[in-house]
Image: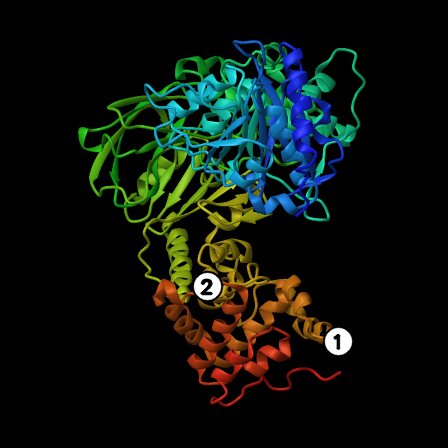
Amino acid sequence: MHRLTHVVPLVLAAIVSAQSCAAVPAAPPTGLTDGVRTIAAPGTPGTLAVWSPDAAVLAVGTADGVIAPVAAAGTVASDGDASGRLVAFSHTGHLDAASLTVGDHEALLNRCAAWAARPREGGPARVALVNCKLGDFFRSLGFEVVDLGPEWGGEGATPLADRIDLLCIVGNALSDAQVSAVSEFLRAGGGVMAAQTAWAWNAPAGKSLVDNPLNRIAGAAGIAWTDRYAGKNDTGTFDVAGPAADLAHAGKAMEAISRDGAPALDKPAAKVAAANATAAARLLPAGDTLLRPRLNELLAAHRKELTPTPEQPIDYSRPLHRVLIGYRDALLATLPYEDLREHADVNAFPNLGASWPARRRVVVPISTAVPGWHSTGVYALPGTPLRFELPEAARGLNLRGRIGCHKDELWHLDSWKRVPNVTMEVVINEQSTHVSTPFGGLVYVVVPENCDPRNINVIVHGGIDAPMYRLGHTPSDEWTVRIRNRPGPWAELATDKVILTVPSSAVKTLDDPKALLTLWDRVLDAAADLAAMPRQRTRPERYVADVQISAGYMHAGYPIMTHLDAVDDMTDASRLAAGSWGLFHELGHNHQSPDWTFDGTVEVTCNLFSLYICETVCAMPPSTGHPALEKRDETIARYFARGAKFEDWKREPFTALIMYMQLREAFGWEAYKKVFAEYRALPDAERPRTDDAKRDQWMVRFSRAVSRNLGPFFAAWGVPTSQAARDSVSDLPAWMPDNFPPRP
């Protein structure tokens, strides 16, 4: 271990002496990173936002390809002669003994501990550890380790400043009282070193990352933990911040993009500045006096310029507008519903220019046995207050009111065709809850998982009617004459198994929604059949069309998100019946099991569902449905000419899919269903945990299901399995497709 114990006492003494001579230092000393080149990057780290002029970025990674802080130090205005001092790290592992041997990590921690410790006269500096196991490390630096006990920070507890000089916190399991105690300690001139993995924080209902315990503490130092992920350098570590990383400091970034007369930044610099300033603008504490005043001034001046559209997207050529959109997003989350009217943007997506004077009172029957979004058939207009009214039986169930279905957030994308966040949710536990949004959207009641099952009526006041067809409930004549012409700009077509959300314009000429949705139910039943799960679902799957989504052409999830050009396939029965590979592909993702999906097959096993639906519902020939499958022989020849390497197999989804198709062609879909049913019934202790175990189980279980030894077949494709797995099926007759593998 590369310990610096022989120099740390001298460094500590020098820094403490320097602190004693200066009343309130203006910034962290530049010496913190002297001689430090790289630090550890444990696990999947997050990033930080840094905006105070009295805070410094110590180390950087990347977030969405942009330099971002992962370690920082800052000061807090003190009630005494010395400022409080805070050092922040973006992953809990940064304050773990395992990181001390990586790069120059230990050297940085040595200096940070020496700098942050509150100056005192006589005796060793005292440190307390909260969920931190660095006791031996601090003792080696000459610290006395103090046990605060389980009740620290509680009512009547001794102030931290009377007990310690430095507090080291790992994680965010702090009570409100402890947050207050640590903040008071900093204001008393104390020092804090803290590390958390903020993207993993499980925010309580109705809370945002601004409410994160460590963010409530660090905001006074102009530092916050973000929900972004940090990319590492080529050596798997983080680099110490240098001059090239100046714009990772949000305060400097804001100065660069908003100062009158400042030269325009080139695109790479503008991207760094905008991304980091936006991250900070979305996390400012309510009482911030460093960035908020300037942002408020700029927001007032540019408010009418903050509506991105497909025709006029907002990209990094307009960095200030991106920052202001981020700031406005955070601001809107804190405003009372009645104040949102002045921010209403009737032209912003998803409102599509809709305007209608009528307000309605709608009674929505809800079964709380069904989790997820419950459609109301109501559309909320931008800036118009909406009220949820709950019966007594529903209060305290933690139901939520949601406005908007376009839930993808786009902050990480280079170009925005709409505002990155256009939806909102609030807890509606009370008898009456008012909500509003500047952007409008369809209205939902959201039931949490494992909710106490009840049948209730929720009343929604203040919205307008939106087109909604429910299979088996909506009369056809009402649909064609009245319902499809409702004024809401978004429509929903619903069954107990799937709900489609599309622009209302797409249903104005839909004469037979029953035929369409009956076909959709067949699609959903086919997916359930192949996955060996019940056709009756816990909740319906959802598809939502959007002008821009967070990733890919479509992506799976709840809801499955698509671009607007998929609407025709979603709403035209003849097009759907002809096979819609993309829509089926994403549905397949939602039916994948990690037990039989190993590295290289995430984009492969989902396509089993595309193949099955195309074949059984759309009556297409087996092994068809996508243009890539038409070149099957060429694909096989090319793969084997390159040596049938597993790394190539994993990189080429349609090459890997051919292997699965060969199994289907030889043994039928029933073999797949049998194997998938086995996996569904597995006790947790028998589920494979590693990729090696997943490949072994898949080969062995399929071999047993078809009474053939598939070991040689897997080997021919280059898909590795263990000798033990191959031996376990060696009693079965070996199988190989005809004329396979191809000869050179």
**Residue 244 location, x and y as percent?**
78, 30
Q: Earlier in the sequence, mark 1 or mark 2?
A: 2
Q: Residue at x 74, y 38 (%)?
A: 37
- State if disc 2 and disc 1 touch (CB < 8 Å): no
> Which quadrant of the rendered structure holds the C terminus?
bottom right
Report helix, strand or loop for mark 2. helix
The residue sitting at the left extreme is: 392
| Residue 540 versus residue 180 in the image, above or below | below
User: Identity of the amino acid at label 2?
Assistant: Asp
- In the drawing, what numbered circle is on residue 374? none
**Residue 358 location, x and y as percent?**
36, 20
Per the image, the residue denoted by label 2 is 595
**Residue 549 location, x and y as percent?**
56, 40
Per the image, the residue denoted by label 1 is 641
Neighbour tally class for label 1: few under 14, some 14-19, many 20 plus, Cα within 10 Å? few
Foreground of the two, 518 or 395: 395
Question: Disc 1 vs disc 2: which is toward the camera?
Answer: 2
Q: Residue at x 69, y 28 (%)?
A: 10
Report how many numbered discs are placed on residues in the image: 2
Foreground of the two, 587 or 641: 641
**Residue 150 location, x and y as percent?**
36, 32
Q: CA distance from mark 1 to mark 2?
A: 31 Å
Q: Is residue 114 left or right of residue 252?
A: left
Q: Quadrant of residue 315?
A: top right
Foreground of the two, 509 or 590: 590
Report helix, strand or loop for mark 1. helix
Q: Is residue 34 visible in the rendered structure shown here? A: yes
Foreground of the two, 379 or 180: 180
Q: Quadrant of residue 97?
A: top right
User: Identity of the amino acid at label 1?
Assistant: Ala
